[in-house]
Image (cartoon, rainbow, N blue to C red):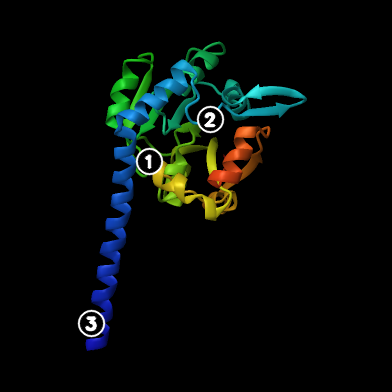
Amino acid sequence: MIILFILFILFILLYILTKKNIYEKYNDVEKYYNNNTTINNIIDNNYFGKNTWHTPLKFNINNTTIDENNFMFDISNLKSKKNPIIIDYGCGLGTFLSFIETKYSTYSKQYKLYGVNISNKQINIAKSLVSKNINFIKSNGNNIDLKKNTCDIIFSQEAIVHHPEKKKLFTEFYRLLKNDGSLIIQDWFLFDIHKASYTNNDYKTYLEPLNTYLKYLHDIGFKCSVFTPIKTNIINDNELNLGFTNYVIKCNKM
C-alpha cells in the first residue's frame, strides 16, 4: 500500500509539473506577441513590405507563379461558398483578413470574418487598422468561442508553429468546421533538429516535422494535401542554417 501511495503522489506531482510547463509555454508565447519589437516587425512586414522575417512564399500553378495569399485563397475554394464564416488563427494585425475581405467581396457581400489571436495588444491595434466587418477573439486556440460545425474555412499563416499542443488545436479546428469545411495552413516545419534551437528560443516556436502535423490531422479525421513553395535562396538558407522549412497544407474535414 505504501508503494502504491508513493507512486500515486509521484503521478500527481508529475501531472502538476507538466501542466505548469504547458502554462508557461502559452504565457511565453503571449509575452512574445505582446512585445513591441514583435509588433513592429509585423507592421514592417505587412504594411511596409520590409520582409523582416522572409519574403512571401510563391507557388507554381499551371506554369504561373502566384503569391502565398492568392494561392491560399484559391485552394480554399472560398469563392464557391455562400455566406461563409471564415477564421484566421494567429491573425496578427489582421492584414490577411483584410486581403480575404477585399478578395471575397468581389463575389459576395455576405460573409463573417473572425481573427483569433493570443495577444490582446495586437487585437486592439488590429481593430484600428482593419474594417469594422472583421471580428476578433482573444484565445490561444484551444477553446474558441464559436459554435461547433459553423465555420467554412480556417486559415493559419505561421502561427501554429508557436502552439505547444498542436493536436489539441487541430481538434478544436475540427470541432468548429462544417462537414465540408477546410483548414489551410502555411507554417514552419522542423527540417533539421540539430539546427532548430535558435529558432525555438528566439521566436518561441515549437517546431515539429511535417509528418507529425499530418499524423495529428489524419488521426483527428482530416484528409490532407501538401503543397511545396518555389525554392528560393531564403528557404534554402532557413533549411541549412535555421533548421526549418515551409509548406502549405490543405485539410478537408471528412
Sequence order check: which comes first, mark 2 or mark 1? 2
In which image quadrant can residue 234 be found? top right
Residue at 57 percent across and 13 percent down: it is 107
Apparent side of residue 148 relative to residue 82 in the rendered image (left or right): left
Question: Mark 3 belongs to which amino acid?
Answer: Phe
Q: As rendered, which of 227 and 177 lies closer to the eye?
A: 227
Is disc 2 placed on a helix, strand or loop? loop
Residue at the disc numbered 2: 54
Do we see residue 89 in this rendering? yes
Q: As rendered, which of 75 and 66 lies closer to the eye?
A: 66
Is disc 3 placed on a helix, strand or loop? helix
Question: What's the CA distance linking mark 3 and mark 2?
Answer: 54 Å
The correct choice, above or below, for 219 with respect to 93 in the image is below
Apparent side of residue 229 relative to residue 94 in the rendered image (left or right): right
Question: Mark 2 belongs to which amino acid?
Answer: His
Residue at the disc numbered 1: 141
Rendering coords of residue 245 (x, y %): 58, 42
Q: Looking at the rendered structure, which numbered label has been put on residue 5?
A: 3
Is disc 1 placed on a helix, strand or loop? loop
Question: Mark 1 belongs to which amino acid?
Answer: Gly
Residue at 41 percent across and 34 percent down: it is 90
Apparent side of residue 253 relative to residue 17 in the rendered image (left or right): right
